[in-house]
Image: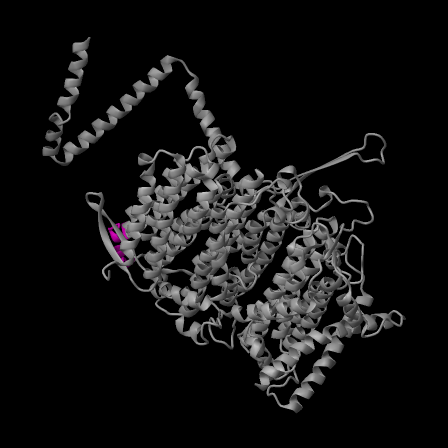
Amino acid sequence: MSSILIQIIQALLLLLLAPLATGFVSTCKARLQNRRGAGLLQPWRNLRKLFVKEVVIASHASWLFRTAPYVVFTATAIAASVVPAMLVDTPLSLTADVIALVALLALARFFLALAGMDIGTAFGGMGASREMTFAALAEPAMLMSIFVLSLSAHSTNLTTMITHTIHTSFALHPSLAFAMVAMLMVAVAENGRIPVDNPTTHLELTMIHEAMILEYSGRHLALMEWASMIKLMLFATLIIDLFMPWGMAMQATPAALAIALGLWLLKLAGLLLALALAETALAKLRLFEVPEYLSGAFIIAFLGLLSYYMLEAGV
Amino acid sequence: MNNIGAIDIALAASVTAILATCSPLVVRRQQHLRAIMCLLLAITAALAVAAGISGLLGSHGQTTLPLGLPWMPMHVRIDALAAFFLLLIGALLLPAAIYSQGYLRHVKQLIPMVVFLPLFVLGMIGVVISDDAYTFMLFWEVMSLASYFLVTFDHHQAENRKAGFIYLLMAHLAGLLILGSFAVLYAASGSLEFQAMRDAPLSPVWATGAFLLAAFGFGTKAGVVPLHGWLPDAHPVAPGNISALMSGIMLKIAIFGFIRIIWDLIGAGDFQWWWGVLILAAGSSSAITGVLLALQQSDLKRLLAYSSIENIGIILIGLGLAMLLARYDQPAMAALGLVAALYHTINHTLFKGLLFMGAGAVVHSTGTRNMEAMGGLIHRMPWTAALFLVACVSISALPPFNGFVSEWLTFQTALLAPQLGSAMLTAMVPFSAAMLALAGALAAACFVKAFGVVFLGLPRSDMAIHAHEIDHWMKAGMIIPALLCLLLGLLPVSIIELLDGIPQLLLHVSLTESVQTHGWLWLTPVHASQASYSAPVALTGMLIIGGAAFLFLHPKGHAVRRSTAWSCGTPETNNRMQYSASSFSQPMRRIFSAIYQPEEQLHTERRAHPLLTTRVSYLVHVHDLAVDKLYQPIANYVLLQAKRLDRRHQQDIRSYLAYTFYTILFLLALLSVQQSAMEQRNQPAATSQSQPPATLPGLTSGQTGTEVRR
């Protein structure tokens, strides 16, 4: 019973902290750029405002346009609730392994792209086309780095993978380093951050994610925005789980959980700060350089695989 | 009733199909003809499903039919493999028969369809239940020939005749190769019966010969790259219900033949390590090439045809992995790969059948296959749109539908495979898994394009504006596979239990134990700690969260305000401002330009002033490199030789007489050589030959008759 309760709390934490995480990144970015920034809570305020605002949709939008926000949000939320954040062994982690998790996110993306095409403006189609193209190129890199991780754990189940990493003594594994770099690169691309896409841009011919949700307003827009915040949170937690899970609670005792929560937040803050630093330091790539970036991620992950076989397999 | 086995039901299905073929002899009115054909086909399908399920549940049987050649009666048999493919045939044939009742309503000349469609079905059922090479090849040819007449059903257009001819050519090339494979097996066993072929020991060289002939033969028929040239031409030109059956079932019959000969007759014990590598490489290249070319099509049915090549590739990736694992003595993992391939086989049957039926409905209603003339059909054809969407989500391997289950199982086979013989092989398996991931994600892009351009946005032509919804028969025909797609996505554990007879037959291992440990809810291919997936739980969670969000957020009672879409401040948007099919795939064209080698032409007209553009036209043509680089040279060479031969035809009567004279001289010389050889061998045989043959009197009387008349 208690593990189910913790599962629910953990899922709610992921959903509710997601806007804060986005706010944290933008505040860090603002400070790095010598601005004051809107504060940690600004994404929450935005969402609250959008939830009470009236919805206006385009005159020839179909039912798909109106259902897509719910599909996108629920698929992302289910994916988020599968990822362990504090307790390693949660009841829902059996529902989907890492591959199924990626597929749930792909389901959200599929409907996001369709919604973009529903209005029939050039922006929506453009966003959908680019999003699907880049997602397709990111997929093999993502899978390859998952593969490198699953080689030593002999599993794609998150709980087993985390347990395996916690129980192996800390040592420098070159394959893991490669896999982590590839995963970070893919995570940046999947979340539409600089250098692949700019989440704060509007009305530029380079935008991807924003182009698809341009016609949304009110609660629909809120759900779409919230889903993309959850996705950022999910990827950050996933990277923490896979590469630095130390300190996560194996048993559901209050003390262990408190330590796990604290460490999780600390690691999250570290990762998001790194993201803010990268976003400040880097410029956005030209659109047709993104494929090279993504195939670079794939090559790095593949190098990780080769180095596993050459350096670690026999050991 | 206890005595009726699966084999009897399957034979009853064949008889119903024959009855349907013969129905034009009795019935004259088109309307009745259509109804009778659809009814009989539906009964055939129901019987095939019944035979398949009872066969999978353990009712095997074999019998010898009093048909065929005097010394070679037909042997038929149902084992788990045959039963599975019977089930697959029936599962799509039943909805297709219902769909045809509506789809064929406006067809003028029905008789070719009524004759050849049931024959086609009969051929497929016959191939599946055959138990000797003669029966197999006979029904194989019935299937190929009948489908040729169905491809050229609309034979008034030259394009269709050409597609049909290429199809016929490739189908017979495939048939020849398969015949060669059987010849090798016959030479080793001395019998045409499958049981003898199974038992006969094969030397590695002969086994390799049989494998290569079968792999290329069935690969041609299944449309494996680079032998796929006929497929994207033939499938689109056939009527909608036929495309569904050809893409949905006939390609799978080639997969069946592949498994039957290579896994069953040659046997997993004879596998060599590079066989699996070859199949894996063919599968990976088919998957990637197929989906990349599908992405660039603006003909809806051609897009679906290329996507079939991709899915055949995915099936072959599963089979190739299983062959590698079977070679390296990992039968349990090999069984997983085999089941993944079979699961994808039935999945593709269902969603590709549904997609082709949906495309048929769209083509029927708009009168064009060109996606650039569609758009906004979701408003006019809501049912078709919803059902087509189900198929798009399924084929893009997204949970909770069925396509994801089989791709997930294939991934698990690749990811959890232990180390194989050499480092090269071990690294190749994950690489092919990455290619599978790329193909899956590109398929999602492809079907976002297909659904988005056809059903969403603004109508791009008058035909799209005046489109109409399909009738109830067609709707009913499409609802069944859509429901099955969801069912197969939600209940993979029960389906894998049903399929368990096939790994037991081919590999002598059972998957039931490892899969079943956590009950029907949790799919655990090896062990729960390694990987697990539960579609019902994920779907329930999504319904709860989505329902809660909707109830909480959706205001009751007042309608949503609608306004014009925003277009950078220009007063109005029109249908030419939206993304089209070719603009959607433009980034892909640019990224993969080395593979596509697109021919692009851009014309900008500036009549009045160099700065005032009046008209822009953009033409793009993407080549299928396999067709350009492989087929065209061969075709050119054959034509060249034919031309050379042709020159010999252009001469006068004297040279023709000379040809005749020399030919007769040559034949006489041949005869005398043969006779002298026989005389040397045994004297009595030569004397008996000198006596007049029995047919001679008739010949002489004929001659006398002519003399009398003179």
Image quadrant containing the N terminus of chain B = bottom left
Looking at the image, residue B539 sits to the left or right of residue B67; the answer is: right
Q: Residue furthest top?
A: B710
Query: Of residues B644 and B710, which is closer to you in this image?
Result: B710
Query: Of residues B55 and B297, which is closer to you in this image?
Result: B55
Magenta residues, as a range? Answer: B187-200
Q: How many marks?
A: 0
Give coordinates of residue B319: x percent, y percent.
44, 59
Is residue B567 found inside the magenta-colored segment of the image? no
Tell me which corner region of the image, top left, top right, bottom left or bottom right, holds residue A11: bottom right
Give coordinates of residue B520: x percent, y percent.
45, 72
Determine whether B670 is above or below A309 in the image.
Answer: above
Query: Of residues A22 and B266, which is closer to you in this image?
Result: A22
Determine whether B165 is above or below B243 in the image.
Answer: above
Tell me which corner region of the image, top left, top right, bottom left or bottom right, holds residue B108: top left
Query: Of residues B507 and B274, which is closer to you in this image?
Result: B507
Give coordinates of residue B43: x percent, y percent.
35, 50
